[in-house]
Structures are given as C-alpha cells and as structure tokens.
Amino acid sequence: MRRTDAALLGQRIGLERSGSDEYVKAMLDHFVKQVDNQTYTKLVSEIMERYVDVSKQLEIKSRELEKSDASRREAQEIALIGNWELSLCTKKLWWSDTMYRILETDQSVEPDLMVYFQKVYPDDKKLVNQIYHDMQSGMVPAEYRYRLLMEGDRIKWVQIRFVGSKDSNGMLAKVHGTIQDITSTKAIEEKLEEYNHHLEDLVQKKVAEVSASQMATIHALVKLSESRDDETGEHIVRTSQYCRLLAEKLWEMGAHKKEIDRAFIDGITQASPLHDIGKVGIPDGVLLKPGKLTPEEFEIMKTHTTIGYQTLASIEKKDTGSAFIKVGKEITLCHHEKWDGSGYPKGFKREEIPISARIMALADVYDALRSKRVYKESFSHEKSLGIITQGRGSHFDPLLVDLFLEHDSSFREIFDGTLTGKE
Ligand SMILES: [Fe+2]
Ligand SMILES: [Fe+2]
C-alpha cells in the first residue's frame, strides 16, 4: 500500500496522526476487512493444497529414504560392510552392528580401538598402526587391505576405506569410513591370479614345445646336409652363438633399429644353422671333392645358396610372417655375399646385403678359420682375428668387424666352449 493510500484511509477512519502506532494498527485492521471472504478462502485453500502436496511428497520421500536406507543396510549386511566413526579429539569410537559380525564379538562389547587392534593379524599390526597414525596426521581419504586373526587361527581379509571431516576451525576432527569383509573376494582374486599363472605357464610350455619341434626340424635338416659335408654339428651350434652375440650387441648399441629387435635375435639364432642347407642339392663329386674346384664345379657349388633359399621360400608359404623363415631366407641366399660386392650369388654389396647375412658371413668365416677342414689345418684365434681384420670393408661389414674386435674374447670362448655368459 502506498503512503498516500494509507493517509487517505486514515482520513476516512478519522485518524489524523499518520505514522503513529494507532494509525498503523487501524490501517492494518481496515486492510484485513477489505480482503473479501472469497479471496481469503482461495488463499487458504491454495496454501493448504500446497501444504498437502508438500507433505505428501515428504511422506513419499521419507518412505523412499527409509527403503533405500534399509536396502543400504541390507546391502552392507550382505556385503559385510561395517560403518565406523572415530573422534580424533576424544578418541571415542562408534561402529555399526555389522562391525560386530565382522569382528565376531558380542554386541555388549563397547566399540574400542584396543578391541579392534587385538583382532589384527600380527604381521599386519605395523600397517594398521601406520594407518592410525596417518588418520591423525590428516592423511585422508584412504583405502587399505589387511588381515584380521579370528578364532581357530582363521584369517579374515578386510578392506578399510575412510574420509575425514573438519570442525568449524578447519581442523580434522573426525574420521569415518567403512570396513568390509573381503575374504571371499580375496579368495576369488587369488584363484584368478593362480589361474592366470597357470595360463602363463601353459603358454610358455606351448611356446617351448613349438620352438623345440622347430629346432628339431632344423637339426634334422642340418644333419641331412651335414652327413655329406665336413662341417660338424659343433660348427652349427657355435655359429648360432656368434650370430646371437653380434645381433645382441647391435641391438644394445641401437644399430639397425628397423630390423633388429627381440624377434630378429631369436630368428637369427634359430635360423643360422640353416645357412648351408642348400648343400643337400650339390652332387657328391663337387661337395666332397678334396682338392680345388674347377670354375664349372665352383658355379655348381655356388647354387647351394639359391637351393637353400628356395627350400625356405616354399616353407614360407605355410608359415607367413615368422622372423625365423624371413631371416633364414636372407642367410641362405646371402651368406657368401661380400661387403665390396665380390661375393655370390647376386653380387650384392654393402647395405644391399641383409644385416642377418652380413652377421652370418663373419660368424661362419671365423668358425671355419678356427676349424680343421679337409683342405686346411685349424688356425689360432689370433691368426683368424688377423684375417677377419684384413677383410674389414672388403669381405665384411666394417661395423661388424669393429664389434667382433671389441668382443673377440667372447668369440674365442664360444669356440673353446668356455663362454660363461657373463658378457
Ligand atoms: Fe655356405
Ligand atoms: Fe658354415
């Protein structure tokens, strides 16, 4: 009501002293009388309706809340989740009924820190003490798992989760949280872990079986060619070791990153024994000839590289993508290629020769130099080292010769059979 209306009203009811208590009271009385009965009833019914509506909603909400509270309690009971609250000032502890079930204690026992600590598994007491310390120094929220020791030496796994609440001064005053009995969850987790280990073992066994059968095939193939050659089984084993050594050293120094990885190292170790597999296709008259070969015979001898390559290429159709066959093909074809392009069968030079074949060439020659053959005596490590050094940049990849010179003692130890694997 505007001031002028109030003055007008005052005049009408005969009160001149506008602004006095009597004036305001009379004005309000008059105003109430002015509100007609109908408007009043409408207002009251509206308010009542709204009230009923609100109370109905409240009723529904409280029923829902009660229900959800009951379900929460039920869920906590089923999941064995106990609630607790600890006052950091008074050290007073409160816990829910489920806590009694978890701790397996009588409901007459008052919630107490000592009662709780006594239940902790001896080896986990240090951890629980630490947790209690962290709580007091404000390190919340947190989550931990530890064991309780129950009657009959039963172990119970629990998971504790808690948060802190601060007082009006912003100081941490209370810590509250849950404790859940996770013994059965833990048992399932352990079973799963056990199962995973079992699966890992199975996979490893299968891999070992496959590589063993792969190696058995290789050795059978190698034996076949070996029976007609003067290269021995030891030559095959040793060249495989030299190849692994050089490949690993290249990998460690980060050279040939595109080609050299773990699969390559395993591939060259397994495939290097195949380097002369093509000799199965060379006639006895050429292969076993003790003297020098005629140029025609040498041409026939050279074909052991392409025969070997073709043999592996035909296998590759059934075994696509394996590093073993890929490296095997490179080695059989190119192990007589030379860095300066004077080798055979393709006359490849430098980087044209696959790194696997360059490694194989050096390994093969070192072992051949050290071994006794029908056409030569065995050479000393020093003499062989000198010959290989002479071939740096002509026969052999200079980087590989440098690596060989750096690790020549390991080559000697492999040949002597005294390598301890310390390098
Ligand atoms: Fe060869
Ligand atoms: Fe060889």
Image (cartoon, rainbow, N blue to C red):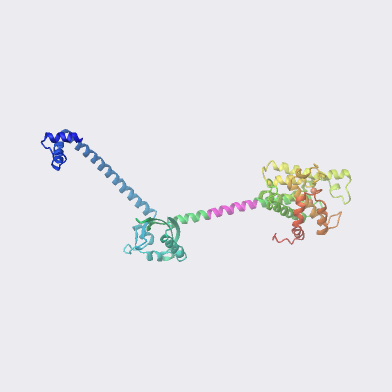
Q: Quadrant of residue 45?
A: top left
Bounds of the magenta span? 194-209
**Farthest residue, direction front:** 17
- Count of marks overlaid on the render: 0
* Residue 88 percent coordinates (x, y): 37, 61
Q: Is residue 153 left or right of residue 312?
A: left
* Nearest the eye: 232 or 355: 355
Closest to the observer: 33 or 21? 21
What secondary structure prevails in the magenta region?
Answer: helix
Q: Residue at image x 51%, y 53%?
A: 192
Q: Nearer the viewer, residue 289 or 412?
A: 412
> Is residue 268 shown in magenta?
no
Q: Which percent across, then down, holds residue 370?
A: 81, 57
> In which quadrant is the N terminus drawn?
top left
Residue 206 sits inside the magenta stretch: yes
Q: In which quadrant is the C terminus drawn?
A: bottom right
Determine if residue 199 is in view: yes
Does 413 appear above or below 65?
below
Q: Is residue 205 left or right of residue 360?
A: left
Query: Residue 338, how many percent across, how many down?
Result: 80, 46
Q: Viewed as shown, does residue 65 lie left or right of 421? A: left
Residue 36 visible to the viewer: no
Query: Toward which corner of the image does residue 92 lie, by quadrant?
Result: bottom left
Q: Nearer the viewer, residue 156 or 162?
A: 162
Percent position of residue 327, x then y: 71, 46
